Image (tube, grey):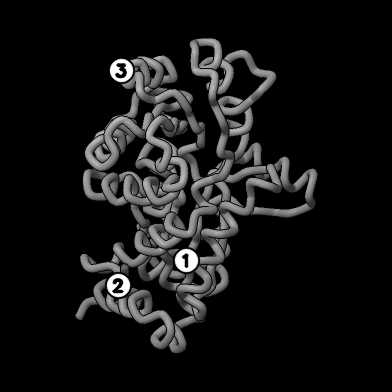
Amino acid sequence: MTQKFTALFVLAVTLLIPSAAFAEVSSKSAILVVSFGTSMPEAQKAIDNLVDTVKKEFPSVDVRLSFTSNIIRRKIQKEQGKFIPTPSQALAQLNDEGYSYVTVAPTHMIPGEEYDEVADVAGAFGSMMGKFGFDEINVCRPFLDGVKECEAFADILIKRFDKQLEDKSTGIVLMGHGTPEHFANAQYLQLQLALNQKAYGRFFVGTVEASPSIDDVMADLKRHSDITKLVLSPLMIVAGDHANNDLAGKDDDESWLNVLKKNGWNDVSVYLSGLGEDENVAREFVRKIYSVYTDTPEE
């Protein structure tokens, strides 16, 4: 049995049997949750919920948090006096503390540019040999990462808005971030397809920085004249700046809220809650961690 295989086997076993196996290797195993981050205290609870859920699932494992946005990290340190490391800083610290097996768990929605950067950092550490490297480091996949994943997330969204969907005249408009000129942006279209198959004409997915845009969303809405009420909500883990301003900004003429009202949709409400606050999303996040090591993850 090779050293690499042994390392993978040990980590896989400890992840799959967290309550028992981690008791023997807790000093060597860690999970690093990676988020873009937010400087808005009220939005931080979405990230906290994901971290807390992982800690409860793996009570004997050290769970750390890192942010990818340097702007947000510096703002938090300046305003709150709180230091949050980058993924590279967090991984270097884990190595310095003697951890051998690390699972990197990004909170990204799609495998876009931001996700690629996290995977590259983890890959760089994974390629290092000797005392400055890890025995094994693995990266979880994002929430929207293929047909099956989009179908699973469509089910989560239908449950999330079950009360609003009881009114047949209500449509749910979701704003994703989007990543221009990256193939992963197609995952938003895949999610729309999954939602159409499960709840046709009730969900309308758009992005703030790519395609489909708000214009695409309105064109789709016009094809469903029975939808007269709209609920706007972020298709993002955190209800941060994009959600509060680009989506729901009352004083911003270009916010989706005002654009929709100017174009004839008068009954528009806002559900400003990050997906990370949803318990079903948190459970899916844990499943992503399990699925790194098994084809039959925990339900």
Which residue sits at x=37%, y=74%?
Answer: 15
Residue at image location 49% in from the left, 61% down from the top = 32
Task: Name the secondary structure under disc 3.
Answer: loop
Residue 113 visible in the displayed image: yes
The residue pinned by badge 1 equals: 31
Q: CA distance from mark 2 to mark 3?
A: 51 Å
> Which dot, 2 or 3, sits closer to the camera?
3
Residue 270: x and y in percent read: 57, 33
Give residue 3's mark. Answer: none
| Residue density around tag 1, few if under 14, some if 14–19, many if 20 or more, within 10 Å | many
Mark 1–mark 3 Cα distance, whole angstroms, equals 45 Å
* Image x and y of residue 22, in percent: 43, 83
Q: Nearer the viewer, residue 271 or 67?
A: 271
Question: Could you tell which of marks 1 and 2 lies nearer the N-terminus?
Answer: 2
**Helix, strand or loop under label 2:** helix
| Residue denoted by label 3 | 223
Please say if 271 is above or below 297. Answer: above
Image mark for residue 8? 2
**Which amino acid does the dot numbered 2 rest on?**
Leu
Q: Which of the two labelled residues, at mark 2 and mark 3, occupies the earlier sequence position?
A: 2
Amino acid type assigned to the residue bearing label 1 in the image? Ile
Q: Secondary structure at mark 1?
A: strand
